[in-house]
Amino acid sequence: SLILGIETSCDETAAAVVRDGRQIVSNVVSSQIESHKRFGGVVPEIASRHHVEQMTYIIEAALQEADAEFSDLDAIAVTEGPGLVGALLIGVNAAKALAFTRNIPLVGVHHIAGHIYANHLIEELTFPLVTLVVSGGHTELVYMQEHGSYEIIGETRDDAVGEAYDKVARTIGLPYPGGPHIDRLAAEGEETIDLPRAWLEDGSYDFSFSGLKSAVINTLHNAKQKGIELRQEDIAASFQAAAVDVLVTKTMRAVEEKGVDRLLVAGGVAANKGLRKALTDACLDKGITLTIPPLSLCTDNAAMIAAAGAIAFEQGRRSDDRLNGEPGLDLK
Ligand code: ATP
Ligand code: MG
Ligand code: FE
């Protein structure tokens, strides 16, 4: 099958063409980071406006790079949620307009299913498996027994890990998005600050990162009052060590207790070098097959939406003209 994927849930306008659910034929991403940087985060109104301006060009570019025409497509897959409602609407309406004027089947895709299926573009998924989803808006452990079936066994009770990275980065004066900057600094620093790990109740797979974030802010505040200068590198290294410790420990426990031999990592924070190394070591130790997408497929893109859409399409799922942007869509 040949599937056109469209993604506009946040601040990336993206379109891609994927063959047979696994082969990227083209993958075009237009990032708006420069427009949001001076505000220190994504401004929904600006995001929507960018998507409107970019959408048709990005779709054309994706088709052109794939040397494909609309008549070659078997389906159009589009992110229907979760995300910013105004941003989602641009992609959803573009997809609907194309699907209905050209008579192409339409499939709505959950954004996080897309992040998970970025892994399918790298290695064919085998089941059962566990996925650690770590992105700007989500921190979840997802158990999958087969294609297209998602059971959330743990999730964050407050901040997503990417959000915590970005807030800590902002506190120490790093530009948005701060995750990659913290990651880079952490490699040059040492874990000199003792920060809390939120394990929650015994046996819980849930996460909590707001306490860790506050602890960093308090530590900085107290140090400043005492006239102590903390190195940015050490703050980054200490924060990263605490975040990675909890993520890796809970993930490996889920892998063990669910009895799976396959672990995937998904979402923007999967680009984190500290997390990648810790999971690689833990999986090697336990004989677990680990898949982590390359950096370009960790952050938002439309190839992952086409990949998840291809599975949904094969399973006979179709969307109709009632498809809408769903900011709070559940993964199921
Ligand atoms: P969601 O997918 O939950 O809707 P999103 O699409 O905004 O949210 P992604 O694009 O998947 O999130 O990921 C962006 C997040 O990843 C940002 O918080 C960013 O700081 C973080 N990130 C990117 N690279 C790294 C890195 N190397 N280390 C830590 N965090 C990183
Ligand atoms: Mg983004
Ligand atoms: Fe995302």
Image: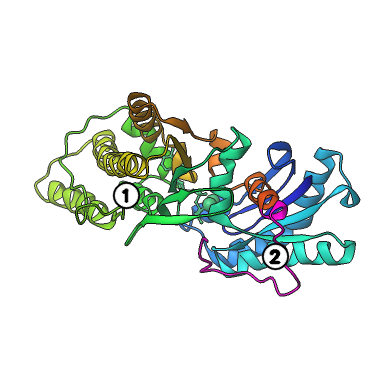
Q: Residue at x 82, y 62 (%)?
A: 99
Rendered position, 28 above or below 56 = above
Q: Earlier in the sequence, mark 1 or mark 2?
A: 2
Q: Give 128 or 5, whichever is nearer the viewer.
A: 128
Determine if residue 34 is in view.
Answer: no
Determine if residue 296 is in view.
Answer: yes
Q: Residue at x 34, y 42 (%)?
A: 251
- Tag on residue 249? none
Provide residue 6's location: percent of width, then percent of height: 70, 54
Image quarter hosting the N terminus: top right
Amino acid type at circle 2 is: Val
Magenta stretch, main secondary structure class:
loop
Rendered position, 214 above or below 123 = below
- Tag on residue 92? 2
Q: Quadrant of residue 241?
A: top left
Specify how the rendered protein is coloured: rainbow
Provide residue 114's location: percent of width, then percent of height: 59, 50
Element marked by disc 1: helix
Q: Residue at x 34, y 28 (%)?
A: 286
Amino acid type at circle 1 is: Val
Q: Which class describes the residues within 10 Å of circle 2: few (<14), some (14-19), or many (20+)?
A: many
> Mark 1 = which residue?
168
Nearest to viewer (mark 1 / mark 2): 2
| Residue at mark 1 to residue at mark 2: CA–CA distance | 33 Å
Query: Does residue 27 appear to the left or right of 85 in the view shown?
Result: right
The magenta segment:
312-332
- Asked whether mark 1 and ligand 1 are closer than 8 Å, the reply comes as no
In contact (CB < 8 Å): disc 1 and disc 2: no
